[in-house]
Amino acid sequence: MLLVVDIGNTNTVLGLYKGRELCGHWRFETANHRTGDEMHILLHMLLQSIGVSPAEIRGCCLSSVVPQMNTALQEACRKAFGWDPFMVEPGVKTGLVLHCDNPKEVGADRIVNSVGALEDRKPPLIIVDFGTATSFDAVTARAEWVGGVIVPGIHLASEALFEHCAKLPRVDIVVPKNVIGRNTTDNIRSGLTYGYADLVDGLVRRMRAEMDGDPVVVATGGLARVIAPISSEIAHVDPWLTLKGLRVVYEKNVGAVA
């Protein structure tokens, strides 16, 4: 079985693959202070929760945008499995050509998202990831990653309103019935949902105008299912796109794991 791990700024997501079947997945808060021992215990507990022993894990693929966490995860893998995880970093085989000013600065999560999208769909593609930041990735018909857009994520915008506007409350991010809110809470919810849906649609249209062909838009991330129904440009939602991309990258570099 293959363990895949994506360490993001807000959450860390783990998935367990048996062949191409995702048979387990977990999400927990990214905490920079966790030690290797803590991560080791956490891995054991997660695997135990679905009846899997560490001996059944034959590989691990890791992408990370939080370098402080990498050492703890590597140490945990050595203790749990006896080997280091495979790291997604510059130089690994992805099947994706990076046509941008500085390929080394492109986040590993954006690469694996693009690889995951290419696994199921023909390019050109635009991938929208609703994470701590909302990122847009442009992949041409020749499977070239040519750049994209980054804006503050929805949760980040929500927290900024709460922290910097004394009379505004923290709200759950759900789509209100009407765009015009009748109370402060729905005012904020409308801005965070309908506002971001229109932001996505507008940026996608501008990106499409600079790309050849008619890119298909694939969304992923925690709030993709909230925004997609009120977006006119998002065609598909794949909540496990990053995990799929990690599996594909591992297979291209190390080989398939049963």
Image: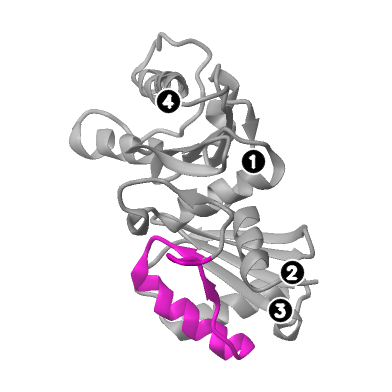
In the image shown, does 160 or 141 lie closer to the viewer?
141
Identify the residue shown where x is 35% and y is 69%. 67
Identify the residue shown where x is 33% and y is 56%. 105
Identify the residue shown where x is 39% and y is 60%. 65
**Secondary structure of the residue carrying numbered label 1:** loop
How far apart are the alpha carbons under marks 1 and 2? 22 Å
**Secondary structure of the residue carrying numbered label 2:** loop
Among the two numbered marks 3 and 2 on one chain, the one whose residue lies closer to the N terminus = 3
Where is 161 relative to 71, above or below? above
Residue 45 percent location from the top left of the image: 64, 76
Magenta includes 69?
A: yes
Res 198 quadrant in image: top left
Where is 220 relative to 215, above or below? below
Report crowding for label 2: few under 14, some 14 to 19, many 20 or more residues within 10 A (C-alpha): some
How far apart are the alpha carbons under marks 3 and 4? 41 Å
Q: Which residue is mark 3?
A: 57
Q: Looking at numbered disc 3 in the image, what kind of residue is underneath it?
A: Ile
Q: Which residue is mark 2?
A: 256
Q: Closer to the camera: disc 3 or disc 2?
A: 2
Q: Which residue is mark 1?
A: 238
Region of the chain picked out in magenta, as a range: 63-92
Magenta includes 227?
A: no
